[in-house]
Amino acid sequence: MSETLPPLLLVGCGKMGGAMLEGWRERGLSEAVVVDPYLAAAPAGVTLVREASAIPAGFAPAAVVLAIKPQEAPAALPAYARFAGGAVFASVMAGRTVAFMRGLLGAEAAVVRAMPNTPAAVRRGFTVACAGPGVSSGQRALADALLGATGEIAWVEEEGLLDPVTAVSGGGPAYVFLLAELMEQAAVEQGIPRDLARRMARATVAGSGALLAASAEDAAQLRKNVTSPKGTTERALAVLMEEAAWPELMSKAIAAATARSRELAG
Ligand SMILES: NC(=O)c1ccc[n+]([C@@H]2O[C@H](COP(=O)([O-])OP(=O)(O)OC[C@H]3O[C@@H](n4cnc5c(N)ncnc54)[C@H](OP(=O)(O)O)[C@@H]3O)[C@@H](O)[C@H]2O)c1
């Protein structure tokens, strides 16, 4: 892929779209148009319009990135069908299938469906993508560069895997934030003042994530490195790792979220 990105159209510049746009600007944008009804201003060099009908005539994007809420899709997508044929569509909308989007964009639309997560805001996201029918290798490479601008990216061949992906990496940050909340609460119960408890829980979760990211060792080994025989951590882990505790609860939680993702996709 060349250094500068080709002409791009971003539909929806909220949390996800905005994070991607920032990543693309760092990479080097040529021409970019953003469609967003209420965005206050676009960054320098980016054209902002309020609706699809205001996109400058003759603008021919190589990619149309769809970062609106899934419920906006039925009303919004048909206006972009005119770009099918030339552009690849890359969607980060939860639960909207490739078939659903092609139903609105036309059967010749080349569509990539992806599931990012919120650490994208700090360029530490994880996105899993799946290419629909007719996506060329060049279009896939472009989608890889655009979706990967907010962190790591991986590809799957089977679209159905995006349901468990949604459960694990899409929702995953929420489970980790819950861990920080619960650690804070448990610390307070042991007599630690609230402010200190909060700082400790945040720093411990964030620091452990940074260590995991920087280390070549896997999570199980890093856990063992903290666990001295007959020590305090071993005592806590004996509670957490009981069959009916975290191992069973985590697999039930992921299964419930996967089932919900399948329901939403209809
Ligand atoms: N946030 C996450 O953790 C996460 C994770 C995975 C996937 N996703 C997916 O990413 C997508 C975007 O989520 P988000 O969190 O970035 O949402 P968001 O912050 O609400 O961004 C959506 C943006 O699109 C704008 N918009 C609404 N209707 C539009 C239209 N017809 N044309 C153009 N722009 C329009 C919204 O403007 P207004 O706000 O003014 O309506 C808003 O700026 C969703 O489909 C979501 O499923 C999000």
Image: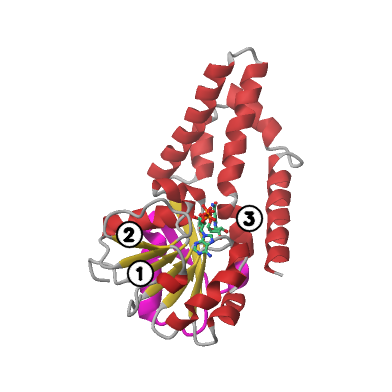
Q: Is residue 16 visible?
A: yes
What's under tag 3, amino acid-wise?
Answer: Ala
Q: Secondary structure at mark 1?
A: strand
Whether 69 is drawn above or below 226: the answer is below
CB-based contact (under 8 Å), mark 1 and mark 2? yes
Tell me the residue that label 2 is attached to.
Answer: 24
Label whose residue precedes the other's in the sequence (3 or 2): 2
Q: Position of residue 248 (x, y in %)?
A: 73, 46
Question: Which is more foreground, mark 3 or mark 1?
Answer: 1
Find the magenta span and give its range.
132-161
| Residue 142, horizontal then vertical, whole percent | 36, 71
Q: Which residue corresponds to mark 1?
A: 8
Q: Is mark 2 within 8 Å of ligand 1?
A: no
Cα–Cα span, label 3 and label 2: 27 Å
**Residue type at the position of mark 1:** Leu
Q: Quadrant of residue 239?
A: top right
* Residue under the point 32% across and 59% down: 24
Camera-side residue: 215 or 250?
250
